[in-house]
Amino acid sequence: DEAEGLFSYGRMAVGQLGDAADHLSDLLRPIKQTLTLDEMKALIGMMLAVVSTQDASGSEAMALIEKTAAGLKVDLPVFLRDQSP
């Protein structure tokens, strides 16, 4: 619920600014100044969780998450496929 609320707020803020990618550094500035590294990782995790619930492929959302992670200098989690038969 919290992730969806933050995602909705972010979408509203982006809607007022235009394309999020164009203003990403402005959007990330208060996050960098306020959150700890663990909190930034949790934020990226929440963003990924929200995208995973969407029916669409989420390619635009994933591109934005990747840019956000890079801007925050946070590695995206790696999900390995199960190798069992």
Image (cartoon, helix red, strand yellow):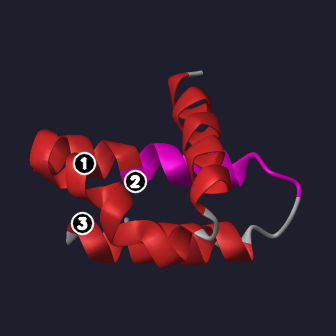
Q: Residue 31 has which mark?
A: 1
Percent position of residue 81, x then y: 57, 72
Does 7 appear above or below 41?
above
Helix, strand or loop for disc 1: helix
Q: Residue 44 has which mark?
A: 2
Q: Do the residues under discs 3 and 1 have CB atoms within 8 angstroms?
A: yes
Percent position of residue 83, x then y: 56, 76
Instruction: Indicate which label's residue lies in the foreground, 3 or 2.
Output: 3
Q: CA distance from mark 2 to mark 1?
A: 12 Å
Please tell me in which quadrant of the rendered image residue 10 appears.
top right
Magenta span: helix, strand or loop, mainly?
Answer: helix
Which region of the structure is painted magenta?
A: 44-55
Earlier along the polypeptide chain: callout 2 or callout 1? 1
Percent position of residue 62, x then y: 60, 71
Does 74 appear above or below 32?
below
For image coordinates 43% across by 49% down, the residue present is 45
Q: Which residue is mark 3?
A: 72
